[in-house]
Image (spheres, rainbow, N blue to C red):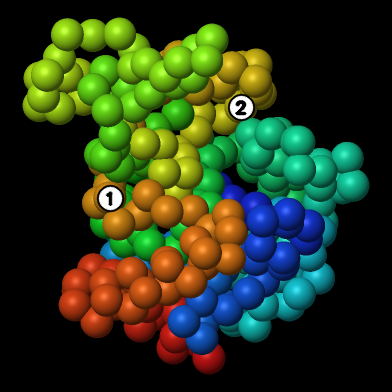
Amino acid sequence: MNILFTLCGRAGSKGVKGKNARDFLDVPLVWYSMANIALYMEKYAGEDDIKIVLNTDSEPLKDLVRRVKDVPVTIIHREESLAGDKVPKVAVILDSLNKAEEIFAQKFDMVVDLDITSPLRTVHDVKNAIDRKKQRNDVDVVYSVAPSRRNPYFNMVKEDNGFFCKAIPSNFTTRQEAPVFYDMNASIYAYSPDALRNKEHATFFNSGCDAVVMADTGILDIDSEEDYELMQVIAKYLFENNEAFKETFNKAIGWK
């Protein structure tokens, strides 16, 4: 199977300035995703043909990726029309796919996007998503989720005409009674190339999806300085006490 890994990060960021090119526990943030890919290639790729691209308009991010000589990443310069904060990421991934097919002169069977600002994933999480997508040719995408700590039937509320009420009216009196919900943690997406080309981007995730469950330590995305600082506290604990997370950290810090 031909698999394309995509790493996508723009230069501009309103929440955390230049976050895609920042260090995270003294390691460039993007190197954690690259470490996941390197470990997957070493341990699980088998006969799969793996290609990797970075789609960005950030020169510092390009330089960080180029420093890692043993992970062959092809850099695609992001066009200005795809660099705005209102551009759906699916459009950038499709751009990566189209240009990768031209560069490598081949078609891909799967596109796997790893979010640069989600460093708390393991190679096992990546493998689980890829394995599930290989099993599910009938779905457009397999994405990662984490168990939700809030439930719209039980302990989530909304404002309605000056009052607050349950997000979804119900008679459930305990969380255990309510239907199970998950957070899309934006860490891993394994796409069908045909779906990227043919499905409406605005409603892409409304149907035709499957998911793999990750630990809820991975639910935080780095969208503010507070997220950045809190994530480092969580990551430090995991890198010291969890072998799967430690494996990713050791691979990444070994490139310094």
Task: Give the image quarter of residue 224.
Answer: bottom right
Question: What's the residue at 53%, 40% (across, down)?
Answer: 111
Q: Secondary structure at mark 1?
A: helix
The CA span between labels 2 and 1 is: 28 Å
- Which residue is under mark 1? 216
- Find residue 176 and report its horizontal and vertical position in percent: 9, 26
The three-letter amino acid code for the residue at tag 1 is Asp
Q: Is residue 128 rendered to the left or right of residue 58?
A: left
Question: What's the residue at 26%, 18% (across, down)?
Answer: 153
The vertical placement of 221 against 60, above or below, is above
- State which quarter of the image contains the N terminus: top left
- Which residue is under mark 2? 196
Q: Residues within 10 Å of mark 2 (few under 14, many from 20)?
A: many
The vertical placement of 233 against 73, above or below, is below
The three-letter amino acid code for the residue at tag 2 is Leu
Q: In this view of the protein, which residue sits in the foreground, 133 or 206?
A: 206
